[in-house]
Amino acid sequence: MNVDDMILVSVDDHVIEPAHMFEGRVPKKYEDSAPRFVRRDDGTMAWRYEGQEILNTALNAVAGRPPSEFGMEPTCIEEIRTGCYDIHGRVKDMNANGVLGSMCFPSFPRFCGQLFMETGDREQGAAIIRAYNDWHIDEWAGTHPGRIIPLALPMMWDPVASAAEVHRMADRGCHAVTFSSSPYDLGLPSFYSDHWDPFWAACAEEGTVVCMHLGSNSRPPTTSPDAPIELVYTLSPISLMATAGDLLWSPIFRKFPTLRVALSEGGIGWLPYFLERVDYIYRHTKHWSGMNLGDRLPSEIFSEHVVLCFIDDAVGVENRHRLNIDNVTWECDYPHSDTTWPVAPETLMMSLNGVPDDEINKITHRNAMRLFSYDPFVHIPAERATVSALRAQAVGWDVSVKSVKHLRPDTASTAKAF
């Protein structure tokens, strides 16, 4: 396949939430206590909520910056691309990158809305989450139909309320919800508990994919306080191996046979060994451990239930037939530091070299469309959705690297972002 003929759908990008997002969406009694985006005395900007200040950090929004300026120092909105926070700018950046569709994880609430667990008023927290989800549906996904796959936040402290929100969002066309890769790390019951059953049941009923992003357990994967930042980045995707094991050995998939979970930004290169290992362990322990999967192997169960997601993973693509290729999806990770923007098609094609066209189409868009109940072709004909067709719409849009010279990395604070 020629790179210009690909159709790309990314199942992992990020939004830097705009200042106006809660206006007119929060119940009147919570208007004064809703999060506010403020400019501080030093010119930097932050979200202010419940006495906390959540910084807009450069690592969250480095697309278009030179790598020498990647870091976690706070920035103001003027120093990041408009595509980070403005949906019109986002679609232009997607066009320039040849990307048709995008699913966007939250930033200041953290990956599964952990921030709103910290309020003393859970009713207020739930109201703010509903307002966030409505903004995501109405503005972020609704402004340019067919371009954004909607993604909802749950009420992590309440599985029944989360289930109700899954149903409400599904009625609005949203079939993806974030969740923690390890709720136990957040002080909540583990996957082995039946505590979460109402939530799993709602997701299974609605065909809603549960998206567990790396870092959504709020614990950076490191070995010691003095380990370098490279260790955190090295271990981050592989940290979802623990989540994969947790899910497999828990009763979740046996109780909810249609449930699907995505290991967001988890990569795929490590998975063939993981699947070999879990089968080996099951064969060697089931006779005395009491684990009973019937006549199924763990790898078979995994292949039915888990959506796989990668940015740039040549080893994983090479070993794709050791996985369920119908569950393999692609990510761009805009505007984070791992992103391949604005040359995602060319970068991806290097890994896809020699892969048959039908398999390329599965990985680049068909699997994502099927798994996330997303059909962009209702709004955009396929011939206008290719890399070349989208880039033709972005002629003249500036994607050059811009330096913000006073910004320099602060690697010591990186772990605080999780």
Image: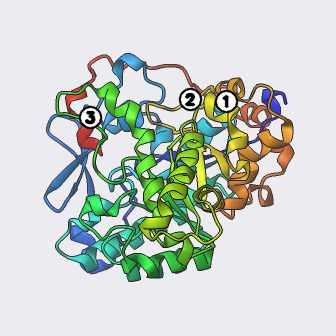
Measured as percent of width and height from the top left, residue 283 is found at 55, 57
Q: What is the three-letter code of the residue carrying label 1?
A: Leu
Q: Do labels 2 and 3 touch, CB within 8 Å?
A: no
Q: Residue at x 84, y 51 (%)?
A: 381
User: Judging from the image, what secondary structure is the residue with disc 3 in?
Assistant: helix
Residue most toward the front?
287
- Give the residue type at disc 3: Thr
Where does label 3 land, which residue? 414
Do the numbered discs 1 and 2 sit on residues whose CB atoms are within 8 Å? yes
Which comes before the other along the chain, label 2 or label 3? 2
Q: Residue at x 63, y 28 (%)?
A: 314
Q: Is residue 98 above or below residue 193?
A: above
Q: Position of residue 124 (x, y in %)?
A: 26, 76
Find the distance from the CA under tag 1 to the CA under tag 2: 9 Å
Q: Which residue does the image show at 69% across and 31% down from the upper left?
A: 318
Which SS class for mark 2? loop
Kindly identify the residue that appears in the image at 45 percent across and 71 percent down: 290
SS type, badge 1: helix
CA distance for labels 3 and 1:
27 Å
Seen from the viewer's position, the closer of residues 95 and 7 is: 7
Q: Quadrant of residue 276?
A: top right
Mark 2 Cα within 10 Å, few/some/many (few <14, many 20+)? many
Q: Which mark is residue 348?
A: 1
Q: Is residue 299 above or below residue 79?
A: below
Q: CA distance from mark 2 to mark 3?
A: 21 Å
Q: Which residue is mark 2?
A: 340
Q: Position of residue 363 (x, y in %)?
A: 72, 44
Within-10-Å neighbours for mark 3: few <14, some 14–19, many 20+: some
Residue type at mark 2 is Thr
Q: Is residue 50 left or right of residue 363?
A: left
